[in-house]
Image: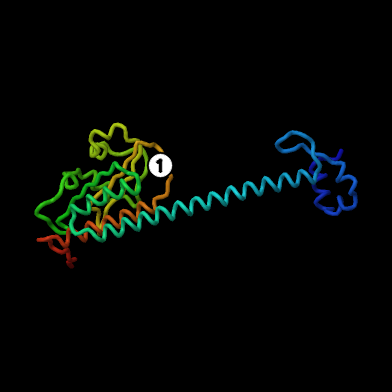
Amino acid sequence: MTTSEEVVQYLQDHPQFFEENPDLMESLHFPHPYEGRAISINERQVAMLREKNRLLQSRLQELVDVGEKNDVIGEKMHRLTVALLSFDSLPEMLHGLQYHLCEDFSIPHVALRLWQIDELGTQADLPSPEFNQTSSNIHILAQGMPHPYCGPEIDDEIRQWFEMDAEYLQSFALIPLKKQSGFGLLVMASPEVERFFPDMGTLYLERLGDMVSSSITRLIQQAPGATTCESTS
């Protein structure tokens, strides 16, 4: 008895078979992929091509949507970069950062902590709560982060930074702030579980961390009474 594999192999070895047997082409019928009725092999091929075309169009639209989304994010990042470059004081910058994250990125829940500031410079009047005391565990965490973290799990100490809002926040993005070493941690939070999820890309978050780190370093070093850090041998 001829098996289906042998039939397939025969047709592959004899591509001219249907050309030599045109009547067979017309008599063969296959189930419609969606409607359940019998159709000819030509109709089946047309249906398959239409489905393939639909999938390709869907994929193309996905790529277009991703491109448009990246364009929007890029424009927002540009506005934030310009703003960070325009701030003349650290308090102004911290307020402006909160404003842009809320207005442009729809992230109203933001907490930031800084430490080891005398390594960057010094200010007589340090703003609060960004300079509230943080534990060595947080310092070690920020220093050891090669990339931003996204997900639902955070240290209880960090959760407390959000005070009364903490109980309904479901996802978080932790962005280390570094110069030569870590000197701060920027945390964004959302009540939506899928806003910051573990497998999401962190490229823009890394860029945000770089921009904020550079802006804070610049403003602290140029503040009245600040001392510029110089390496020693």
The single residue placed furthest to the bottom in the displayed view is: 233
* Residue 153, horizontal then vertical, whole percent: 34, 38
Judge by depth and name the residue closer to the eye, 30 or 1.
30
* Residue 134, horizontal then vertical, whole percent: 19, 44
Left or right of 175? Residue 87 is left
Residue 36, relative to residue 199: is it above or below?
above
Which residue does the numbered mark 1 point to in the structure image? 197
Residue at point 37% right, 44% down? 150
Instruction: Give the residue type at disc 1.
Output: Phe
* Residue 90, horizontal then vertical, whole percent: 18, 55
Assign the N terminus to one quadrant of the image: top right
Left or right of 13? Residue 119 is left
The single residue placed furthest to the front in the displayed view is: 103
Q: Quadrant of residue 87?
A: bottom left
Residue at point 27% right, 34% down? 165
Residue at point 33% right, 57% down? 79
Judge by depth and name the residue closer to the eye, 92 or 139.
92
Disc 1 packing (10 Å; few <14; some 14–19; many ≥20): some
The single residue placed furthest to the top in the displayed view is: 167
Left or right of 106? Residue 163 is left
